[in-house]
Amino acid sequence: MRILKERVLKERVLKEIREQLEEKLVELENISHEAQYRLKCIGNKDDRHICVNRRGSKYQFYVIDKYGKRQYLREENIDVASNIVKNAYYNRTLNTVKEQRTAINRFLKCFDENAIKNIYNNLGEGRRQFISPVIPTDEDFIELWLQENSGEQNPYPENAKYITENGEYVRSKSEKIIADMFHKYNIPYQYEPILKLKNKKNLYPDFIVLNVRERKTYYWEHLGLASEETYATKNLEKILIYEKNGIFLGQDLILTIETEYSTLDIKQIENKIRTYLL
């Protein structure tokens, strides 16, 4: 499983690189528009070059024409130097943006993070029987993930039990609803697994869930009595423990909240499943 986790981590890094490059393309497009706008504001297109010499605390500027001839610019003509420098800068920026966009698009066009996985997926059943895929199939990965994250590990005594569609017992009706939603959307999960913390202590999340497409693990906590002060304080401390162990809310940790005045929102659960797990 360690090797699988390393592979999954690498796949996730590659996916993040693709997303970052796509965001970079948007950023470059905005830079291009800004440079074009500033060029337009200059108005006078001047492709000559500027030579800059420093003398004491001041600079001297010379215009160089296409024949290499230098012409000194007096202080009253400094706007000429300004326009030439700006024109060169914005044009060079546009050319560099174009080069960077071309390089990124070429990479994105050629690179497919699923290419190796699809070699096996595209094989017929007759050929698959002879092969153990280099990258595990989703089915194999899910099976290993479930074995690695055994459920029902919380030793705390249970007062009431509700049986889920998946056949396990949970402590509350709301947890049953959440578990049944996982079942409905075919989300692999385990109820109350053990999470070993950095201080050698254990935590027992309500659920551990898997985004199969990204092969990313999340923890899901349901705060069923959030309007009770003692309960709320205890669970806020629990969230802090998660974060101290590198598991951050909205990144690796998902919350649903229920109070005396606000019952469990089914649509909210579905939205979070679609956002994080599908």
Image (spheres, rainbow, N blue to C red):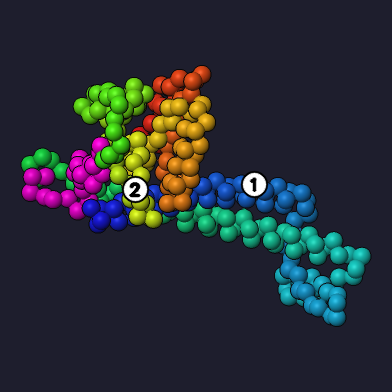
Quadrant where the C terminus lies?
Answer: top left
Front one among 120 and 135:
135
The residue at which mark 2 appears reads as: 202
Q: In the image, is 261 to the left or to the right of 91?
A: left
Q: Which segment did they paint magenta?
A: 128-152
Residue appearing at x 86%, y 77% in the figure: 57
Is the residue marked by circle 1 packed among few (<14), some (14-19), or many (20+) residues within 10 Å? few
Residue 33: assigned label: 1
- Residue 121 shows in the view: no
Residue 13: assigned label: none
Q: Please identify the quarter of the rendering in which residue 276 is found.
A: top left
**Type of amino acid under label 2:** Asn
Residue 227, compared with residue 144, is above or below; it is: above
Is the residue marked by circle 2 packed among few (<14), some (14-19), or many (20+) residues within 10 Å? few
Front one among 124 and 241:
241
Residue appearing at x 55%, y 54% in the figure: 98
User: In the image, which is nearer the foreground, mark 1 or mark 2?
Assistant: 2
Front one among 200 and 142:
200
Give coordinates of residue 129: x percent, y percent: 8, 45
Give coordinates of residue 60: x percent, y percent: 84, 74
Q: CA distance from mark 1 to mark 2?
A: 53 Å
**Type of amino acid under label 1:** His
Tell how many labels: 2
**Element at label 1:** helix
Residue appearing at x 58%, y 59% in the figure: 96
Q: In the image, is 263 to the left or to the right of 189?
A: right
